[in-house]
Amino acid sequence: MYYLYHYFEKERGPFLNLSDLTDDEAIQLLTDFSAKNRKMARDFNGHEQYMLKRRIVEKRAYSMFIRKGGKPQRQAPYYGILSEDELEEGYEWYLDCGVIKIPIDEFDKSTVSFTYGDSFPTFNPGREEEPEYNLYTYDEIIGIIAKQGMPPLRTEYMSWWSDHTYIEAQIWSDETIDRYRE
């Protein structure tokens, strides 16, 4: 059985998206968060540029999901990882990491999209060429898993976001997750 795992900073709580904030609020939050977490300071270097790119990435994912028949109820998704087990590297993303595990069957599948790897490089606004991988519906990602298997675990030679180290889920509805908020 597959689950969606949502990793989050316990101090802030689960199921938040920077894109739900104003640019000033998001940049301040990233600045504060980066001051506490050196890894995040490296990953989110240039907060204004990061937020600009993030909004473009989420807009591209939203548009593609609608074209594939998805029924998003939010403009920006919440994020999770599709897996049978917890992802050890997920705990590295936050200083005091929490995780919520939700069976995939609890979601309306028309409100969840997937990328085989992180969505940021999939829809990176800096890429001029077509992405080598794409956004998928639930049925499509299950077909890919059947053919290719789950992505390999990250190695020390792989970047955490530029390689296929997990299947990211973009959750475009509050309906199911509202039952799991702390």
Image (tube, rainbow, N blue to C red):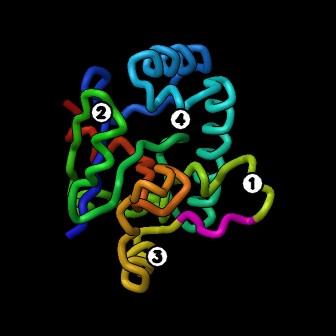
> Left of 75 or right of it: where is 13?
left
Is 130 on the left-hand or right-hand side of 147?
right
Give the left or right position of residue 49, taking residue 34 as reference: right
Tell me, for residue 127, which label it has, or none: 1
Q: Position of residue 90 (x, y in %)?
A: 32, 46
Residue 167 point in image, percent of width and height: 41, 61
Q: How far is the residue under mark 1 from the one under mark 3?
A: 24 Å
Q: Which residue is mark 3?
A: 140
Compute the Cα span from label 2 to label 3: 27 Å
Label located before the other in sequence (1 or 2)? 2
Residues rendered magenta in the picture? 130-135
Task: Tell me how far mark 4 sits from mark 3, CA to CA.
Answer: 30 Å
Give the secondary structure at mark 4.
helix
> What is the residue that sits farthest to the bottom in this orientation?
147
Q: Which residue is mark 4?
A: 43
Q: Which residue is mark 2?
A: 14
Mark 2 vs 4, N-terminal side:
2
* Callout 4 crowding tier (Cα within 10 Å): few <14, some 14–19, many ≥20: few
For mark 2, does the 10 Å Cα neighbourhood hold few (<14), some (14 to 19), or many (20 or more) residues? many
148 inside magenta stretch: no
